Every structure is written in structure tokens, then in C-alpha cells.
Image (tube, rainbow, N blue to C red):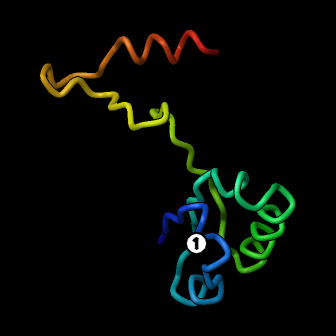
Amino acid sequence: MEVWIKGNYMNDVDLDVLANNGVENVFLHSNAFDLFGEENVSAWVKKANDKNIKIHLEMQCFYNETWVDPIDINKKEFNFIIILILRSMK
């Protein structure tokens, strides 16, 4: 089982409750690093790993001060202009 956690809630999560309820994977929003710093996030990840919970970072890829929808709703297909822009940023 897995759960998604917004970065600002990282320290509010009871890892024991998650582990005791079968959660094995947590997707933590990457803004946790901005909010709490690398040292604190790394320590939290270590605590989770000690309880056999794997932490994965969730990153917003289609955000530019507002949500950028990668789907052209009118055409019902990917917005290829956005995809091309992202590819050019490598």
C-alpha cells in the first residue's frame, strides 16, 4: 500500500501508524526539501526506512507558478508544444 504526502505535512505523519497499517511506500512532495532542508528530510527518510517504508519523491513537472495542463482538452491529446519545451530544457 502507498500514500502521498504533501511536503508541508511531512513532520505531522506518524510513521508507526503507516507501518502498522501496511504502508510500504510513501510519495513525498519534493517541496519538503524547501520547507525543512535536506538534513531534516534525510533524517525523516531514514526513520521511515527503519520501519520498512520506502520514500519516493514526487515532483511537479507541469507547474510554472500555476498548473500547466499537459493535455489539450479541446483536441483530447497531449499538448505537444509543452512537451517540446520540456525536452529542450535538458
The three-letter amino acid code for the residue at tag 1 is Glu
Q: According to the image, label 1 marks what residue?
A: 24
Residue at the image point whose x is 58% and y is 89% from the top: 17
Q: Position of residue 44 (x, y in %)?
A: 76, 70
Residue at the image point whose x is 48% and y is 12% from the top: 85
Determine the residue located farthest toward the left in the rendered image.
74
Looking at the rendered structure, the secondary structure element under dot 1 is loop
Q: How many marks?
A: 1
Residue at the image point whose x is 49% and y is 31% from the top: 64
Residue at the image point whose x is 58% and y is 72% from the top: 24
Please determine whether, in this image, residue 36 is positioned above or below residue 57: below
Please determine whether, in this image, residue 37 is positioned above or below residue 2: above
Q: Nearer the viewer, residue 62 or 80?
A: 62
Q: Position of residue 49 (x, y in %)?
A: 75, 71
Q: Is residue 69 left or right of residue 12?
A: left
Q: Nearer the viewer, residue 42 or 53?
A: 42
Q: On the image, which quarter does residue 14 sit in?
A: bottom right
Where the C terminus falls, by quadrant?
Answer: top right
Determine the residue located farthest toward the front in the rendered image.
65
Please determine whether, in this image, residue 12 is positioned above or below residue 25: below
Q: Position of residue 23 (x, y in %)?
A: 54, 76
**Mark 1 surroundings: few (<14), some (14-19) or many (≥20) residues within 10 A:** some
Please determine whether, in this image, residue 64 is positioned above or below residue 78: below
Q: Nearer the viewer, residue 80 or 37?
A: 37
Q: Position of residue 41 (x, y in %)?
A: 77, 62
